[in-house]
Image: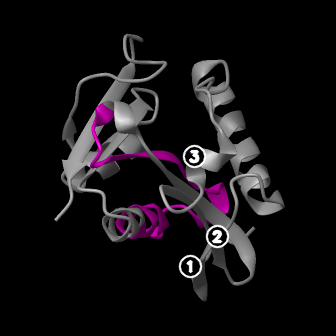
Amino acid sequence: MSNSPVTDLVFRDVPFDSPEAVSLIAEVQQEYVVRYGGPDDTPVDPAEFAPPTGLFTIAEAGGELAGCVGLRGNPAEGEGSVEMKRLYVRPGFRRHGLARRLLASAELRAMALGYTRLILETGTKQPEAVALYRSAGYQPHAGFGLYKDEEGSLHFAKNLD
């Protein structure tokens, strides 16, 4: 894995259960185990990340898997809301702005899918993620989903325009 600047960056949509996505999701789940003591147990149906209501995007840099981000419609939050899941950058590609680029891409893609608000859940043991979301204009949001009442769980939202 590279630790040099991210070059030849390509974003590509893949099914949530594709080999590339499964590999990256396993890595992010392992990161949750290290940080929180267990994986994210949020129920996930791969179909939720498929068009026309969702997507799953991988980032490749120099031909290597570098990161990913997913969007899934969240009708419980209202018709215009989409939830972001699994924003992840592999360790060798961190600190080069890739997470910010994946986030910006997710926002643009959410608008293209017709959504007007992006919501997400993260935790206090991911200070890098919290700093990214706050710097990108995300505001605290009421809890939702499996971790809505969990101590250490943080929820954010951003109106898309």
Q: Could you tell me which secondary element the residue under label 1 belongs to?
A: loop
Vertical placement of residue 62 versus 57, above or below? below
| Residue holding disc 2 | 3
Other residues around mark 1 within 10 Å, as few (<14) / some (14–19) / many (≥20): some
Write down the quadrant of residue 45 in the picture: top right
Write down the quadrant of residue 74 in the picture: top left
Q: Amino acid at mark 3?
A: Glu
Residue 114 lies within the magenta run? no
**Residue drawn at the location 63% of the way across and 35% of the way down:** 44
| Residue holding disc 3 | 48
Q: x, y percentage for residue 81? A: 31, 46
Q: Amino acid at mark 2?
A: Asn
Q: x, y percentage for residue 34? A: 66, 28
| Residue holding disc 1 | 6
Q: Mark 1, mark 3: which one is toward the viewer?
A: 3
Residue 111 or residue 78, whichever sits in front: 78
In this picture, which residue range is highlighted in magenta?
Answer: 77-105
CA gap between label 3 and label 2 equals 33 Å
